[in-house]
């Protein structure tokens, strides 16, 4: 199975900050990488797919980049609603696998 | 598009269970459905996927033999079932529809909480 490792596992930031989360794959996954956001008690929400494609309805302050084994999710200017847990997911090959999550907290 | 999952379940170890995910607003047979587990306070884990059009089903290694995924195209519903629950099956279970052309979930169910306790 392809292992996905996110860093950091937790992050404290303030409203208005620029934040970057990294996801590394144990082998190359081309651009088959997605990012989700999950708030407590809620289902995940798709933000980014194919490494950099913004899902319809997702604000443009979210962006994704990378290919191969290293990927980043950037939030250009944090809003209060962005404090949540973020997961990456590879889908080059089954079983699709998630990263362990990055919890973004208010400083 | 909407996915509505069955309600909270409280079961005893050894009991069987089948939870459901009813889809609406799209052609059910044309999109993969996935099941994802989230244990209390933990991250997301893929369990398996099914394509209702031909019932092609794939399980993640950790869940192979532990659960059964099925679908009923007549009522546009996917299922996840256990024949003998364990306490370690206590978790939130989400279903989701795969995005057209990508193996990512763009529409999610609200989740079904399963608690297994003696």
Image: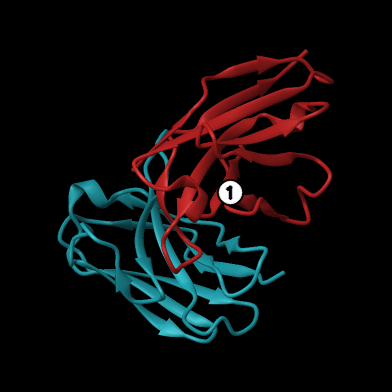
Chain colours: A cyan, B red
Residue B43 visible: no
The image position of residue A43, as x and y in percent, is 42, 41
Q: Is residue A40 left or right of residue A27?
A: left
Q: Is residue A76 left or right of residue A70?
A: left
Q: Which residue is rendered at x = 47% and y = 46% of the image?
A: B28
Image height of B64 relative to A8, above or below: above
The image position of residue B66, as x and y in percent, is 80, 40
Quadrant of the rendered image containing residue A12: bottom left
Image height of B89 relative to A77, above or below: above
Q: SS of the residue at dot 1?
A: loop
Q: Which residue is rendered at x = 78% and y = 26% of the image?
A: B85
Residue B67 visible: yes
- Give the residue number, with chain letter if any, for mark 1: B52
Image height of B118 relative to A77, above or below: above
Quadrant of the rendered image containing residue B77: top right
Q: Which residue is rendered at x = 46% and y = 50% of the image?
A: B97
How many tags in the picture? 1
The image position of residue A53, as x and y in percent, is 31, 73
**Chain assignment, label 1:** B
């Amino acid at each position: 199975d392809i292992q996905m490792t996110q860093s950091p596992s937790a992050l404290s930031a303030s409203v208005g900050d620029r934040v970057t989360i990294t996801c590394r794959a144990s082998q190359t996954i081309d651009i088959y990488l997605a990012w989700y956001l999950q708030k407590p008690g809620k289902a995940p929400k798709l933000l980014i797919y194919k490494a950099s494609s913004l899902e319809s309805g997702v604000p443009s302050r979210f962006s994704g980049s990378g290919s191969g084994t290293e990927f980043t999710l950037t939030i250009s200017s944090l809003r209060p609603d962005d404090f949540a847990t973020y997961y990456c997911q590879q889908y080059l090959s089954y079983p699709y696998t998630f990263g362990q999550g990055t919890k973004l907290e208010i400083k | 598009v909407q996915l509505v999952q069955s309600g909270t379940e409280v079961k005893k170890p050894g009991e069987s269970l089948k939870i459901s995910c009813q889809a609406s607003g799209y052609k059910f047979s044309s999109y993969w459905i996935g099941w994802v587990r989230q244990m209390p306070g933990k991250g997301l884990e893929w369990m398996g996927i099914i394509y209702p059009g031909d019932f092609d089903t794939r399980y993640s290694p950790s869940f192979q033999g532990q659960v059964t995924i099925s679908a009923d195209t007549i009522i546009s519903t996917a299922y996840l079932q256990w024949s003998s629950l364990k306490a370690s099956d206590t978790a939130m279970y989400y279903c989701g529809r795969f995005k057209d052309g990508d193996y990512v979930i763009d529409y999610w169910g609200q989740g079904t909480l399963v608690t297994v306790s003696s």
